[in-house]
Amino acid sequence: MRYMRFVVAAAGFASLGFLWLDHGAAAQQPRPGQDEKSNMALVGYNDLQARSAYQPLIRRQGTRWIAYIGHHGGAALNPLTGQQESNGTSIVDVTNPKQPRYLAHIPGQSGQGEAGGAQMVRVCDGSQLPRADKSKVYLLRTAGNTGHEIFDVTDSSKPTRLSVVVSGLRATHKNWWECDTGIAYLVSGAPGWRTDRMTQIYDLSDPAKPVFIRDFGLPGQQPDGTGPPSAGLHGAISTGPNGNRVYFGYGTSAGGVVQIVDREKLLNGPKEPTSQNLLYPQIGRLDLPPNVGAHTVFPVLRMEIPEFGRQTEAGVRDFIVITNESTANECREARQMVWLAEITTESKPFGVSNWTVPEASGNFCGRGGRFGTHSSNENLTLIYYKRVMFFAHFNAGVRAVDIRDPFDPKEIGFYIPAVTDKTDKRCVDTGTSRERCKVAVQTNNVEVDDRGYIYIVDRANTGMHILELSGTARQVANLP
């Protein structure tokens, strides 16, 4: 449901002791094996070998549908090889969503804690990329915190590494890859930059031969910048050459910045990272309040507003949906939620509404783990685009929100997976020699496919759930 409206001006918007496992307040937490749902139904499930999961991406490959899932750091047994493998990338056949079939695991980087693994995945067909082998399918992924690499996943059961795009980095995160042009916006911690996350832009139209284009970030983040640098980049979404825009989100749960950039000027303008050159492609910027971040910035463009249908002007408007990331367990932070900003006049973006899950609806602060938003779906499938968005909400599961009126978003469904015997605990420091730990679902990221199925993956090792809308929520979506 909607929590309150907001208006933001364009310029301002283990403890070392033993573990104490808290199983108290049984009425406040669902029993193991018990899911919670409204207008959403479980279709299929895979445990992903009990690996902590980050980003799911679903692609149609020929007659099959394949899910690629990026993982946080850690290690688990791969029953397909009989080996203990560092978390990397899971590949699952979801052609029949009722019976997903695990195909392969590509090991990732070890020794970096949760930041290791291979969290971010993007996939492009060679038939789309301008200079690639037309018979191939390519996977772009992060290599822990240190680099980016490309795999040939034409045979999704036998992936092989094709090339290393860049290595020697300090951090990575949510990349974006334009399959029609090959341009990739890689979140990187480039040596010398004053932030651990900025943008390295590469031409990956021939994935075997990456070509560097430029570095990019906010003024002050460059190597010779001055003053305190803004929060690091979390990710970008590009509309490609037709839309000619790239939307950048900076910050996690604090100091967020949304930046609207002219793609043509970004790629072909002056590339030396001076403050002047970094500002050259910028069209608009929205600085968020100190306790608000910008994990995912999703454009919702050319929205027809029914309420304004009889107005003589401005009945069609542009928006961005800004999703914060909750980072602290048991509500030990400001509430992280969803914010909608109007960008019809791109140079002057401003907030128009927001949305969150009411804490009392599930006593979520007491359940354990994080409570608050993390990310939204990123597929622009016409089934849902401009109608329904899905938000990963950690221990509140995934939430379906009707955005047809961006000034008044409304929740229409949710699904909270059941805790399993593989679900990991989440702890907080009690200020004593003991930590308080609770086993809690942590729905981390969400994606949809072009059939309308919804995929959620869990940070606390609970696996991947494949869902569909049910009941009255199906009437809101453009489902067949």
Image (tube, rainbow, N blue to C red):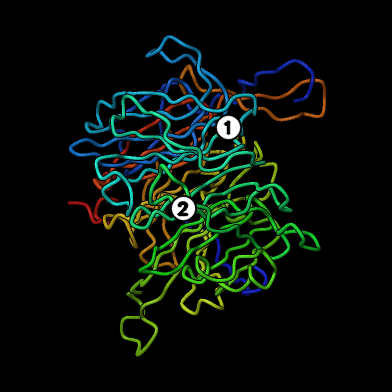
Q: Which of these two is toward me, 76 or 261? A: 261
* Residue type of the residue flagged with mark 1: Arg
- Real-space Cα distance between discs 2 and 1? 39 Å
238 displayed left or right of 325: left
Q: What is the secondary structure assignment of the residue under circle 2?
A: strand
Q: Looking at this view, is 369 or 23 the one in front? A: 369
Above or below — where is 133 with respect to 458?
below
Q: Give the crowd class for mark 2: few <14, some 14-19, many >=20 residues within 10 Å.
A: many
Horizontal arrangement in the rendering, residue 358 relative to residue 197 (left or right):
left
Q: Position of residue 18 (x, y in %)?
A: 75, 15
Residue lying at the far bottom in this picture: please name it: 312
Q: Which residue is mark 1?
A: 367
Q: Residue at x 43, y 67 (%)?
A: 406
Residue 146: where, in percent of width, then height? 61, 37
Element class at badge 1: loop
Which three-letter amino acid code belongs to the residue tagged 2?
Ala
Seen at 40% across and 44% down, the residue is 207
Q: Nearer the viewer, mark 2 or mark 1?
A: 2
Q: Quadrant of residue 112?
A: top right
Q: In the image as oriented, which residue stretches furthest toward the top? A: 82
At label 1, counting other C-alpha atoms closer than 10 Å, the crowd grade (few under 14, some 14-19, many 20 or more) is many
Disc ID at residue 184: 2
Q: Is residue 377 above or below residue 463?
A: below
Residue 167 point in image, percent of width and height: 59, 39
